Amino acid sequence: MKILTETSARHIHLCEKDLKKLFGKTKLIPIRKLSQPEQFAAKEIVTLTNKNKKLNLRVIGPTRDYSQIEISRTDAIKLKINPPLRLSGHIKNAVKIKVLGPKGNANIPVIIAKRHIHLSDKEAKKFKLKNNQKVSIKIKGKRELIFNEVLVRTGKQHKSAFHIDTDEANAAGISNKTFGEIIK
């Protein structure tokens, strides 16, 4: 079972309240569609700041019910913070960092997103996989690697893709369109 592997670079999801605080508006400007339906890279960019350390990152739209930042372990080291390794959306008790926008600032929770697979309900059934099941993904190449503890996330609107952060992509030598093999 082959699956497209995508690198999820550092980014931020914003709720309308925080978008208003940071940018003085409630609508994002899309510049590029992402692989998951209805998601897009927005024109808007924010700056994370902690103890004179700064990092810029792009806003991903559309707005959500909550705000969250997803970074890699390398980014966390640069910012001198220790965010938890979590699934997207699991932000309870996560460390917060100051986020600067052109119109204001906000303290927003930060996580390092766990590696995961997106599958539509139909694809999950076809591959005999269930939501929250853990699988492994083998990436072939000069830096061949097997990623274990990959969580399956299913949903009606999901499009099949394996998401890893930039640290994981670099470890596996991924730079172009790459497919992984799902191992149950």
Image: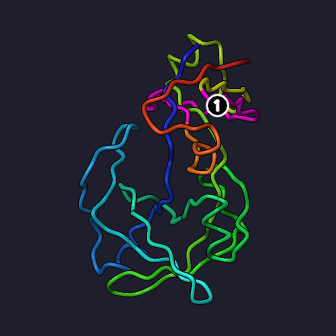
Look at 57% across and 38% down and name the residue there.
173
Position of residue 100 relative to residue 66, above or below, is below
| Majority SS type along the magenta span | strand
Q: Residue 143's x, y, as percent?
A: 64, 33
Residue 15 against residue 80 in the figure, above or below:
above
Residue that protrudes farthest toward the front in the picture: 142
Q: Residue at x 47, y 63 (%)?
A: 12
Residue 141, position as x, y percentages in the image:
59, 25
Looking at the image, which is closer to me, 60 or 53? 53
Residue 159 is drawn in which quadrant? top left
**Hey, what amino acid is under mark 1?**
Val
> Residue 79, position in %: x, y?
62, 76
Q: Quadrant of residue 43?
A: bottom left
Quarter of the picture holding the N terminus: top right
Q: Residue at x 54, y 64 (%)?
A: 69
In the image, residue 88 above or below residue 164: below
Q: Magenta stretch containing residue 167, yes or no? A: no
Of residue 32 and residue 105, the one placed in the foreground of this image is 32
Q: Secondary structure at mark 1?
A: strand
Circle 1 residue: 152
Q: Quadrant of the C terminus?
A: top right
Q: Residue at x 65, y 57 (%)?
A: 112
Relative to 9, residue 171 above or below: above
Using the image as rendered, state which of residue 82 and residue 128 is in the foreground.
82
Q: Which stretch appears magenta?
A: 142-162
Asked whether residue 144 is drawn in magenta, I would say yes
